[in-house]
Amino acid sequence: MSLKCGIVGLPNVGKSTLFNCISSSRAQSANFPFCTIEPNLGSTNVPDKRLEVLSDICKPQRTIPATVDIVDIAGLVKGASHGEGLGNQFLANIRECDAILHVLRCFDDGNVVHVDGSVDPVRDKEVVDTELQIKDLDTVTARLAKADKAGKAGDKEAAKLAALLNRYKTALEQGKSCRSVALLNEEEAALAHDLFLLTNKPVLYVCNVDDASAAKGNAYVEAVREAVKDENAEILIISARTESEIAEMDDYDDSQMFLEEMGLEESGVVRLIQSAYHLLGLQTFFTAGSDECRAWTIHKGDKAPRAAGVIHTDFEKGFIRAEVIKYEDFVALKTEAACRAAGKMGIEGKDYVVQDGDIIHFLFNV
């Protein structure tokens, strides 16, 4: 499955610098607003030490990690919902993303221009939130008029949609994002998904700090934490400049030593991708053999046929069964044959819920 995260925020807060650190592509980075105009597209591998272990055991011809697509989207300004700056383009690009990585400037530096003249990450957050909420309110109001009319004419599905849209409208008019509205059941969740509302997307607030604050944060980060405490969102502290220096290092030991000197256990890039996975409710299963070791991304709760379909649609259509080995058992016993002999291979059917780290061989017939 393809996962796309959009890096958003006001101009000149470190979006492109962060993009350069986590993506195989390189975006222009400069000290002036609207440096990024066209969305930069790139991808990054999902860090997973388990895949490295499996590769060491199987010695495959190739090892393929899971990947995440990253989009660096043009900076937003006040009035974007009405087309100011690059607003229309920004909003169109963010609509295509699965999750939002909202970069907030949480550092002082007189040499780096701020579009509003001062550093205030909570204010910056509210600017972006407001523009997205205004756009969503326009969308909800238009959809509500049609759904309400159809519902009153006897369309039960339209009536359910109208009820949900009314709750979204109330929240948006109160300055709240749609993600703050609790969904009552799976049916409502499906309706909400099909609306593709901007403020319903999962969001990770990325606090871009100075080097000295990379390990523990600062007062700006604490202000952000307080501002988002009631949201269904996560916060990540990262120094884009530090990450940029790490990205330039070719030697793994050198980068680890650098991280230790900074008081960090792992790079912000690794933590960011892991946080994005958690935010979207994703997990990994593996296929492992002499030809290939590969990590595959699925949603938590997905059953075996759905997981098979991630590899190929024919696997899902003709699913027969799944042969499942737990990661820990494979690492201990080293081979599929040994796991089978020890009774550590489960034969699972269509109702099996795939677990994070499962090593699976699918049998199918088309």
Image (cartoon, grey):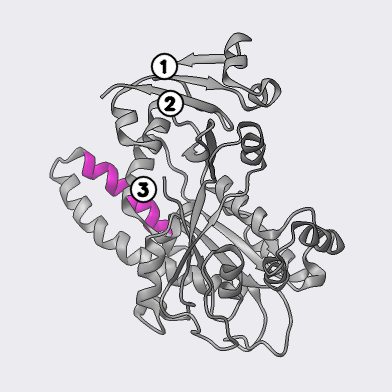
Q: Residue at x 57, y 13 (%)?
A: 340
> Residue 349 got which mark?
1
Question: Left or right of 90: which side holds 260?
Answer: right
Q: Secondary structure at mark 2?
A: helix
The answer to whether the residues at label 1 and label 2 have Cβ atoms under 8 Å apart is yes
Q: Residue at x 81, y 63 (%)?
A: 258
Residue 159 is covered by the magenta coloring: yes
Label 2 vs label 3: CA separation?
A: 23 Å
Q: Secondary structure at mark 3?
A: helix
The answer to whether the residues at label 2 and label 3 have Cβ atoms under 8 Å apart is no
Magenta region: 157-171
Residue 235 image-quadrant placement: bottom right
Residue 354 in the image, given as x and y percentages of width and height: 50, 27
Residue 240 is covered by the magenta coloring: no
Identity of the amino acid at label 2? Ala
**Would you name the residue on which mark 2 appears?**
304
Identity of the amino acid at label 3? His
The residue lying toward the viewer, choosing from 155 and 222, is 222
Q: How dense is the environment of label 3, judged by Cα within 10 Å: few (below 14), some, or many (20 and up)?
A: few
Q: Residue at x 65, y 32 (%)?
A: 57
The residue lying toward the viewer, choosing from 223 and 341, is 341
Label 3 vs label 1: CA separation?
A: 29 Å
Q: How dense is the environment of label 1, judged by Cα within 10 Å: few (below 14), some, or many (20 and up)?
A: some
Location of the N terminus by quadrant is: top left
Residue 168 in the image, given as x and y percentages of width and height: 39, 54
Question: Left or right of 38: which side holds 27?
Answer: right
Question: Left or right of 42: which side holds 139?
Answer: left
Identity of the amino acid at label 1? Gly
Question: Left or right of 109: which side holds 59?
Answer: left
Location of the C terminus by quadrant is: top left
**Would you name the residue on which mark 3 appears?**
193
